[in-house]
Image (tube, rainbow, N blue to C red):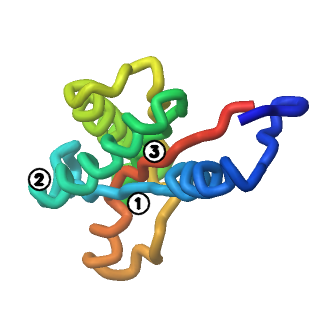
Amino acid sequence: VSTLDNAPVVSEDNKDDILETEALLKKSASVNFIINTAKFTNSAEATEKLDEFIEIAKVLDGTIIEIAGNTDPNPDIDPKDKANKLLSQQRAETVKQYFVLNGIPADRIITVGNGSSNPVVKNDTEEHRAMNRRTDVSFKCIE
């Protein structure tokens, strides 16, 4: 790929490769956790999702991976979200450890503990709260 100002120049010869790379960069994975722990809700399901992401990460070996841990809120006993921030960071570190054990260099991985600030659904039912106890894994473009 030839570049001009670090932007790839698309030609008929490399168009498919660039489109495939862009599609791979948009891949993500989420895994859920048992309440108040950094243990996967379903280990088999979690490893399947993470293994698929790891295979893509090995192909895109120059990319940065962000692992963002999340929790459901617990306003009665954690009104400032301190415990949730710590737990969400532990969840992200659990996934990072899995990646490193499976061949992804630690220096490619950024972990973030969001606490309960990033729900994917309202926390109005136990099922919804369980969905918010997760980590999200994605590729990050650093400029």
Image location of residue 49, percent across then percent down: 26, 56
120 versus 6 height, above or below: below
Q: Amino acid at mark 2?
A: Ser
Residue 76 visible, this angle: no
Instruction: Assess whether mark 3 and mark 2 are in contact (beta carbons under 8 angstroms).
Output: no
Element on which disc 2 rests: helix
Query: Disc 2 and disc 1: Cα gap in Å?
Result: 23 Å
Image location of residue 26, percent across then percent down: 55, 56
Q: Which residue is mark 2?
A: 43
Q: Closer to the observer: label 3 or label 1?
A: 3
Q: Amino acid at mark 3?
A: Ala
Report the residue at 48% width, 37% height from top. Answer: 60
Q: Which residue is mark 3?
A: 68
Residue 96 visible, this angle: yes
Report the front residue among 15 and 7: 15
Query: Disc 2 and disc 3: Cα gap in Å?
Result: 18 Å
Assess disc 1: are there few (<14), some (14-19) or many (≥20) residues with their C-alpha within 10 Å of its C-alpha.
many
Q: Could you tell whether 20 is left or right of 76 in the image?
A: right
- Residue placed furthest toward the front: 13
Element on which disc 1 rests: loop
Q: Which residue is mark 1?
A: 73
Query: Disc 3 and disc 1: Cα gap in Å?
Result: 16 Å
121 versus 49 height, above or below: below
